[in-house]
Image (cartoon, rainbow, N blue to C red):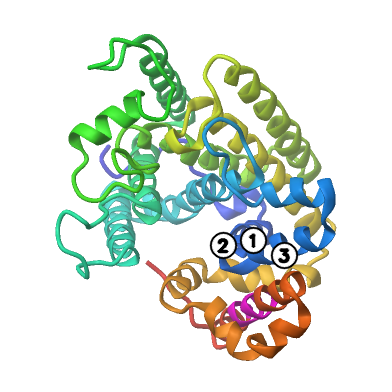
C-alpha cells in the first residue's frame, strides 16, 4: 500500500526512549566544535607543547595530503553519519502519520534548502560563471540526505544494508579494475583516478582542486554509504531489544571492527578522504560508531551532562554557527581584543593561543545566546 510504513519503523513506546537521546546532540556539538574554533585552539596548544609530541598533535588538525587518515579527516564524515541518524528521527514519524508522500515532501524541502545554503556559503551569485561552486560540503550533505532518505523510505533494513554494500563494492570495483579513460591505467593517484576524470569531464563550475572537487560527482556514491551507516546507528539506538550497555558494546566494538577492516582494505584500496574511498568510509564510520558509543555511555547512561553543556549549545544550532563562521570572521574579531601590543608582549605562540581562545569564546557566546533565547535554524 502507498501509505504503509516500512517494517523498520519503531515508535517511542517500542524503544522505551522517553525523549531525545542527548548523546546525539552532544556528538553533533563535538563535531562542530572543531569547525568553529576548536581546531585553531588545538593547534595553538600543540605549538605550545612543542617537540615531537606537539608536532604530531598539530598534524592531526590537518587533512592528510592524499593517502592516510588523521583526526581532522573524521570531522566531515562524522557529520554525514549524524545526518543519517537525524534522517531516521525526522522521516520515521512522517512515514507513520502521513505515509510516503509526506515523507518525500519533508525530504525534498530539506535537501533543496540545504543545497541552496551550500551555494550561498560558497559565495552565491557574488562570482560570475564558471567560478560558482556547485558541489561543496553542504551540497554533499544535501545529496546524502536526499539519496539515503529515498532508500530509507522504500527499503527495509536488509535492503538498506544491501544498498550500502553495493555503494562501497561498486565504487571499489570501478576504481580498482576499470582503467581510467585517456590513461589506460588503473590508478588511485590524485590526478589519474575515476573520480578526478568524471569531475574534470562532467562537473561544471568551480572545482576546489582545479580539475576535481573533493565533494565531486562520483565520490557522492560512497558518501551515501556513510550516511546509511548513520541510519543503522539510529536503528540500534532506538531498538528496545537491546539494553543500553549492549548498545554501547555494539557501538564501540563494532566501530573498532570497522576501523580494522577499513585499514586492512586500505592495503589494496587506499584510505583517501579527497575521493572518499570505500576503505575511508569504513575507517571514518568505525570511529563515528565508537564516539557515539562513548558519548551515549557518558551522557545518557552515566548522566554526566554538565561538562557537555557547550557542546549542546553548538549541537542545537550546527547550521547556524557554520553559516555564521562564513560571514563573521571570529579570528579577525578576536584581534580587536588581543591583537597589537597584546600579541607582541605575549609572543608568537602564546599570542596565537590568546587569539584562537578568544575566537572560540566568541563563537560559543553566539551559540549560547541562541540556545538561551530558543532560536534554532530548522530546515
Tell me how far mark 3 sits from mark 2, CA to CA.
Answer: 15 Å
Q: Where residue 303 appears, x then y in whole percent?
A: 82, 63
Image quadrant in which you'd find residue 264? top right
Judged from the image, the secondary structure of the residue bearing numbered disc 2 is helix
> Is 358 part of what is drawn in magenta?
yes
Q: Which residue is mark 2?
A: 35
- Label 3: how many Cα within 10 Å (few below 14, some 14–19, many 20+): many
Left or right side of 228 for 100? left
Image quadrant in which you'd find residue 351? bottom right
Q: Which residue is mark 1?
A: 39
Q: Where residue 107 appears, x then y in whole percent?
A: 32, 53
Residue at 64% x, 64% y: name it: 40
Judged from the image, the secondary structure of the residue bearing numbered disc 3 is helix
Q: Which mark is residue 44?
A: 3
Front one among 321 and 86: 321
What secondary structure is the magenta-colored segment mainly?
helix
Q: Where residue 117 appears, x then y in whole percent?
A: 32, 64
Front one among 363 and 199: 199
Judged from the image, the secondary structure of the residue bearing numbered disc 1 is helix
| Residue 19 seen in this snapshot | no
Q: Which residues are magenta?
A: 357-364
- Label 2: how many Cα within 10 Å (few below 14, some 14–19, many 20+): some
Query: Disc 1 vs disc 2: Cβ atoms closer than 8 Å?
Result: yes
Front one among 56 and 266: 56
Left or right side of 62 for 320? left
- The label nearer to you, 1 versus 2, is 1
Tell me how far mark 1 sits from mark 2, CA to CA.
Answer: 7 Å
Left or right side of 150 for 128? left
| Residue 69 seen in this snapshot | yes
- Label 1: how many Cα within 10 Å (few below 14, some 14–19, many 20+): some
Q: Where residue 254 appears, x then y in whole percent?
A: 70, 30
Amino acid at each position: 500500500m502507498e501509505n504503509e510504513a516500512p517494517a523498520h519503523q519503531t515508535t517511542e513506546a517500542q524503544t522505551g526512549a522517553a525523549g531525545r537521546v542527548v548523546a546525539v546532540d552532544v556528538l553533533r556539538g563535538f563535531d562542530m566544535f572543531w569547525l568553529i574554533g576548536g581546531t585553531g585552539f588545538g593547534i595553538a596548544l600543540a605549538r605550545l607543547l612543542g617537540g615531537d609530541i606537539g608536532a604530531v598533535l598539530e598534524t592531526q588538525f590537518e587533512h592528510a595530503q592524499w593517502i592516510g587518515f588523521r583526526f581532522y579527516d573524521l570531522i566531515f564524515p562524522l557529520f554525514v553519519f549524524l545526518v543519517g541518524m537525524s534522517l531516521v528521527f525526522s522521516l520515521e514519524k512522517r512515514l507513520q502519520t502521513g505515509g510516503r508522500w509526506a515523507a518525500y515532501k519533508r525530504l525534498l524541502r530539506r535537501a533543496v534548502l540545504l543545497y541552496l545554503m551550500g551555494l550561498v556559503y560558497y559565495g552565491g551569485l557574488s562570482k560570475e560563471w564558471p567560478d560558482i561552486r556547485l558541489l561543496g560540503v553542504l551540497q554533499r550533505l544535501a545529496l546524502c540526505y536526499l539519496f539515503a532518505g529515498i532508500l530509507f523510505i522504500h527499503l527495509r533494513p536488509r535492503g538498506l544494508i544491501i544498498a550500502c554494500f553495493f555503494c562501497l563494492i561498486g565504487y571499489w570495483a570501478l576504481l580498482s579494475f576499470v582503467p581510467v579513460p585517456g590513461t589506460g591505467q588503473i590508478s588511485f593517484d590524485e590526478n589519474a583516478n575515476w573520480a578526478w576524470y568524471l569531475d574534470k569531464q562532467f562537473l561544471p563550475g568551480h572545482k576546489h582542486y582545479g580539475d576535481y572537487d573533493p565533494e565531486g560527482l562520483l565520490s557522492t556514491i560512497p558518501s551515501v554509504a556513510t550516511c546509511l551507516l548513520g541510519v543503522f546507528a539510529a536503528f540500534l539506538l532506538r531498538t528496545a531489544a537491546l539494553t543500553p550497555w549492549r548498545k554501547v558494546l555494539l557501538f564501540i566494538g563494532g566501530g573498532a571492527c570497522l576501523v580494522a577492516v577499513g585499514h586492512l582494505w586500505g592495503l589494496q584500496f587506499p584510505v583517501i578522504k579527497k575521493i572518499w574511498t570505500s576503505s575511508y568510509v569504513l575507517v571514518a564510520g568505525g570511529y563515528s560508531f565508537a564516539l557515539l558509543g562513548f558519548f551515549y555511555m557518558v551522557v545518557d547512561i552515566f548522566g554526566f551532562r554538565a561538562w557537555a553543556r557547550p557542546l549542546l549549545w553548538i549541537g542545537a544550532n550546527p547550521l547556524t554557527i557554520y553559516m555564521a563562521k562564513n560571514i563573521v570572521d571570529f579570528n579577525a574579531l578576536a584581534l580587536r581584543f588581543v591583537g597589537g601590543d597584546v600579541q607582541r608582549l605575549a609572543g608568537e605562540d602564546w599570542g596565537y593561543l590568546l587569539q584562537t581562545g578568544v575566537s572560540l569564546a566568541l563563537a560559543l557566546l553566539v551559540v549560547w545566546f541562541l540556545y538561551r533565547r530558543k532560536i534554532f535554524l530548522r530546515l
